[in-house]
Amino acid sequence: MKLSSRSRYGFRAILELALDYGKGPMQIKTISDRESISNKYLEQLIAMLKASGLVRSMRGPKGGYVLARHPSEIKLSEIFSTLEGPLLTVECLDHPEICPRFSDCVTRDLWQEMQEAVLKVLEGKTLQDMVVATRKLGSK
């Protein structure tokens, strides 16, 4: 399984907002500079995060973007599904009718187990966990 640049950059962008949570809005340019993500691409990512209710915008000369909720209330699974869509290792897990071997496929069980393991990690961690880990590294 390979994550898209959308997820990698989107997680970095929302982590920037989480690291500055409570300090006021952050402008796209600030996130872009800190994370070396193009403004144009970052605007697309922030729009997705905003549409899902994870981020909100604030207007005005000192406007920008903030998290819609405290980082401890945002599960990584929410961010992932916003950026990537539902976690699905193989199509037949959601649509068994497409596979004639569905009922006796040993590998299907493996894909199901992998999917559940990844989902468990994403459900079990919050954006605040990433903030704490970042601060332990001393990078922010």
Image (cartoon, rainbow, N blue to C red):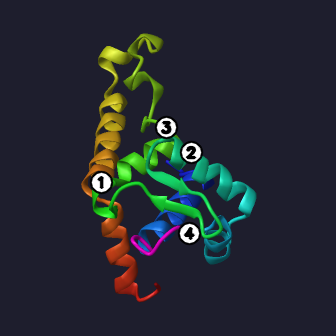
Q: Is mark 1 on a helix, strand or loop?
A: helix
- Which x, y percent locates residue 38? 73, 64
Cα–Cα span, label 2 and label 1: 22 Å
Check the image and name the residue furthest to the front.
Answer: 60
The residue drawn where x is 41% and y is 54% is 68
Q: Does the magenta stretch include residue 122?
A: no
Q: Earlier in the sequence, mark 2 or mark 3?
A: 2
Q: Which mark is residue 48?
A: 2
Cα–Cα span, label 3 and label 1: 16 Å
Q: Residue 121 carries which label?
A: 1
Q: Which of marks 4 and 2 is nearer the N terminus?
A: 4
Q: Which of marks 3 and 4 is nearer the N terminus?
A: 4
Q: Is mark 2 on a helix, strand or loop?
A: helix
Viewer-closest of 60 and 122:
60
Cα–Cα span, label 1 and label 4: 28 Å
Amino acid tagged 4: Met
Q: Main secondary structure of the magenta part?
A: loop
| Range of magenta residues | 20-26
Q: Dot 2: within a 10 Å radius of its alpha carbon, few (fewer than 14), some, or many (20 or more) residues?
A: some
Q: Nearer the observer, disc 1 or disc 4?
A: 4
Q: Residue 26 carries which label?
A: 4
Query: Which residue is the site of mark 3?
Result: 85
Cα–Cα span, label 2 and label 3: 11 Å
Do residues under tags 4 and 2 come within 8 Å of each other at their CB atoms?
no
Viewed as shown, does residue 32 lie left or right of 81?
right
- Which x, y percent locates residue 69? 35, 56
Do residues under tags 1 and 4 come within 8 Å of each other at their CB atoms?
no
Q: What element carries label 4?
A: loop
